[in-house]
Image: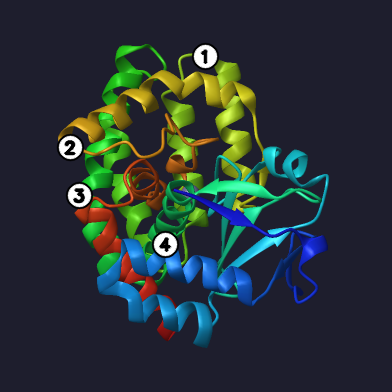
Amino acid sequence: MPILLPTINQSPKLKLVARVDGIPLYSGPKFQELLYNVDQKYYPSMKKDFKEAIYNTKRLIPCIVNSKGFWRKLSLILGWGVYMSAGTVGFYDVNRKKVYLILSSMTGFLTLYSNYHVLGVQCHEFQHVACHLSPQAAAYAWRVEEQWYHVFLIKAVELGRLEHGAVRALMPLFKMLNKAEARGRSFQQAYLIFKTLANFAPEPWIANNFLKIGNALRQGKWLIRADEWLYLYFFEAASYAYHNLIQEYHLTRYTDPDVSMYYQELFAPSEIVAMMASIDFKNPISVKIMHYGLDALNKA
Ligand SMILES: [Zn+2]
């Protein structure tokens, strides 16, 4: 079902609600109403929590952006808690503990958006929120994440992207990363992952690149310029791991993301359940984690 969004020019009641990385975001009552209507229709059992998050705690913010350079800027970053699907973009601002759903980045046009994309992006972001704010949610998410990492690593070795021994060396590190993520302290752990990836890289130039990313993460940089080679390097293994999840959990494909943009999975395990949520925002695992996230966010 498409929804019709007003633009900035048509909505004098819009207010500047935040700047994310310098980009101004605007919101207003119309957007709150649009989102609330969609949420209560698709998740009637969570209607009260959504109402609370949109209108009272205001930690879930539907908004639009009026910036021409927005997409270019966004496509250059490798970031934790940023996700887009067909024109809808979600950000989870870890510091402010707020979720921004950017419903439109068009100016001067009326735009048609599918509820499915909005719901997919929303559910995606709430998986990050849940795994960040609730250790219980992160522990619950681990069984899906563990399976994904296992299949991903085995496939990566099979394809010659990593040397033998990588699976056994990396699995315990990913488990620790899952726990570190829930405590909001995953920088050092993410560095260890990339250092270990470097140890199992088949060629020195690959090892050097892994170390470069690891060092940036160690310095606390969640936003790193995306390296295209990394995307291509693990594409097949990551794709394979997601297809495995789709089959294993009988996911219905509402949206069609093959793999996430730039392997957030390697430094943020919640990206795995987040991608699962984008693929199928109605599957029981994603809905349960979203409920944890919504609750934790309202109480944060
Ligand atoms: Zn994400």
- In the picture, the disc for residue 156 is none
Q: Position of residue 101 (x, y in %)?
A: 57, 60
Task: Look at the numbered discs 3 and 2 and tell me whether their residues touch, using CB distance below 8 Å.
Answer: no
CA distance for labels 3 and 1: 32 Å
CA distance for labels 3 and 2: 16 Å
Q: Position of residue 106 (x, y in %)?
A: 74, 48
Vertical arrangement, residue 5 with respect to residue 162, above or below: below
- In the picture, the disc for residue 126 is 4
Q: Earlier in the sequence, mark 2 or mark 1?
A: 1
Label 3 packing within 10 angstroms: few (<14), some (14-19), many (20+): few
Q: Position of residue 278 (x, y in %)?
A: 40, 45
Point 52% across, 55% down: residue: 187
Q: Earlier in the sequence, mark 3 or mark 2?
A: 3
Q: Nearer the viewer, mark 4 or mark 1?
A: 4
CA distance for labels 4 and 1: 38 Å
Label 1 sits on a secondary structure element that is loop
Location of mark 3 (residue): 143
Q: Nearer the viewer, mark 3 or mark 2?
A: 2
In which quarter of the view is residue 155 placed?
top left
Q: Amino acid at mark 2?
A: His
Q: Position of residue 281 (x, y in %)?
A: 33, 51
- Inspect this view and state whether residue 135 appears: no
Label 2 sits on a secondary structure element that is loop
Label 3 C-beta lies within 8 Å of the nearest ligand 1 atom = no
Q: Amino acid at mark 4?
A: Phe
- The mark total stands at 4
Q: Nearer the viewer, residue 267 or 101?
A: 101
Label 3 sits on a secondary structure element that is helix
- In the picture, the disc for residue 203 is 1
Q: Amino acid at mark 1?
A: Glu
Label 1 C-beta lies within 8 Å of the nearest ligand 1 atom = no
CA distance for labels 4 and 3: 18 Å
